[in-house]
Amino acid sequence: MRNFTAIVERCTETGLFTGFTPGFPGAHTQGETMDELHQNLQEVIEMLLEDGEPVLEAEFIDTQNLYTD
């Protein structure tokens, strides 16, 4: 079993949730709900893995909260 990290955002224009896997070319999609987005991301990643192991362009490391005055 493989584990991939997805970044999730909400588009301010459409209200859709968008998600992508950092460094994994083509691993991005959208959905109207978080559940739909999760399912769509899982399907996209499974489809991409059918072509073989991905050549990851980057590796997800961390998130950080930044504060300014």
Image (cartoon, grey):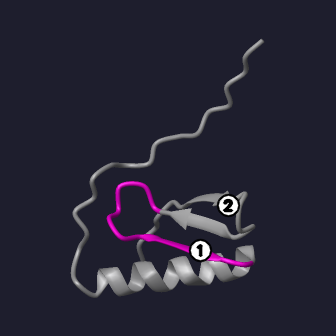
Reading the image, the residue beneath label 1 is: 30
Q: What residue type is labelled 2?
A: Cys
Which one is nearer the viewer's eye here, 37 or 54? 37
- Looking at the image, residue 3 sits to the left or right of residue 50; the answer is right
Q: Quadrant of residue 51?
A: bottom left
How many marks do you count on the picture?
2
Task: Residue at 32%, 65% (x, y): give it.
Answer: 25
Residue 22, above or below 54: above
- Looking at the image, residue 6 sits to the left or right of residue 48; the answer is right
- Looking at the image, residue 31 sits to the left or right of residue 61; the answer is right
> How would you classify the magenta stretch by its main secondary structure?
loop
Whether tag 2 and tag 1 are in contact, CB under 8 A, the answer is yes
Estimate the x, y position of residue 60 in percent, counting from the top left: 44, 48
Task: Residue at 31%, 81% (x, y): give it.
Answer: 49
Looking at the figure, which quarter contains the N terminus? bottom left
Residue 12, above or below 27: above
Camera-near label (2 vs 1) is 2
Task: Residue at 72%, 73% (x, y): give it.
Answer: 34
Residue 52, above or below 16: below
Is 63 magenta? The answer is: no
Is 23 magenta? The answer is: yes
Label 2 – label 1 distance at C-alpha: 9 Å
Reading the image, the residue beneath label 2 is: 11
Q: Which amino acid does label 1 sit on?
A: Gln
Q: Residue 60 carries which label?
A: none
